[in-house]
Image (cartoon, rainbow, N blue to C red):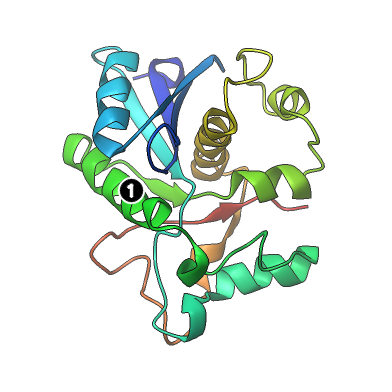
């Protein structure tokens, strides 16, 4: 199967009318939708992905492994905050997030692997990625990463889902080489060996 016959999937999990889902195709074209839960997102994806098309990778905007330590803070989140001088509000601990992001993020990873068992998955953080890449607008980000999409997605959820798909593409194709899942504290789950594994967390070098 050629690269042009593959798609990259992105998800920005949330609650009612707050769950973004997107596909980015091998030719850079993209489309997205805003739904209400994982089941809706999977139904949309199965309509959006033509039969015979391979899913090359998935990016999910939610913490995909957790810590049993204070606030469920992780080494990856601490590194992002320290490296870029970000606040806890910009890179939150799992304990401070709404339940929809955590539950629907894990459920989306589970359901997409039910359908595509070997698909690789990476965590993503679209809003911070845009900030650290100095992509102040969606149009600038789309140009930088050769995404052919509407001038602006219909919602921030759709934008973040599309950026999550791009994060998966850049990571699994080897252009984003830093993997934040490789460094973790003693209280953290092992992203390569727990019930949702394997998951990665690719990050752009800046």
Image quadrant assignment for residue 22: top left
The residue nearer to you, when weighing 169 against 100, is 100
Image quadrant assignment for residue 8: top left
The residue nearer to you, when weighing 16 against 150, is 16
Residue 90, percent from left and from top:
67, 59
| Relative to 13, 132 lies left or right | right
Residue 16, percent from left and from top:
38, 36
Visible residue check, residue 25: no
Element assignment for label 1: helix
Indicate the quadrant containing the N terminus: top left, top right, bottom left or bottom right.
Answer: top left
The residue nearer to you, when weighing 87 against 110, is 87
Residue 159, percent from left and from top:
58, 30
Visible residue check, residue 151: yes
Residue under label 1: 104
How many discs appear? 1
Which residue shows up at 77% across the image and 50% down it? 132
| Relative to 74, 19 lies left or right | left
Which residue shows up at 35% across the image and 33% down it? 36
Residue 179, percent from left and from top:
55, 59
| Relative to 137, 98 lies left or right | left
Residue reaching furthest to the left: 114
Q: Is residue 39 above or below residue 64?
A: above
Would you call the spot at circle 1 few (<14 residues within 10 Å), some (14-19), or many (20 or more)?
Answer: many
């Amino acid at each position: 199967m050629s690269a042009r016959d593959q798609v990259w999937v992105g998800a920005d999990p949330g609650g009612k009318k707050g769950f973004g889902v997107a596909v980015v195709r091998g030719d850079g074209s993209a489309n997205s939708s805003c739904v209400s839960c994982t089941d809706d997102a999977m139904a949309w994806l199965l309509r959006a992905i033509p039969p015979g098309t391979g899913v090359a990778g998935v990016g999910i905007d939610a913490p995909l492994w957790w810590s049993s330590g204070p606030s469920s803070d992780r080494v990856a989140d601490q590194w992002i905050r320290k490296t870029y001088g970000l606040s806890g509000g910009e890179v939150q601990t799992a304990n401070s997030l709404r339940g929809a992001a955590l539950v629907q993020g894990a459920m989306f990873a589970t359901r997409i692997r039910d359908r595509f068992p070997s698909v690789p998955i990476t965590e993503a953080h679209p809003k911070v990625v845009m900030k650290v890449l100095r992509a102040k607008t969606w149009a600038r980000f789309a140009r930088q990463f050769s995404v052919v999409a509407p001038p602006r997605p219909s919602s921030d959820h759709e934008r973040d889902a599309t950026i999550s798909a791009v994060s998966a593409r850049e990571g699994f194709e080897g252009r984003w080489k830093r993997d934040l899942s490789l460094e973790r504290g003693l209280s953290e789950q092992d992203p390569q060996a727990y019930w949702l594994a394997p998951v990665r967390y690719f990050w752009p070098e800046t």
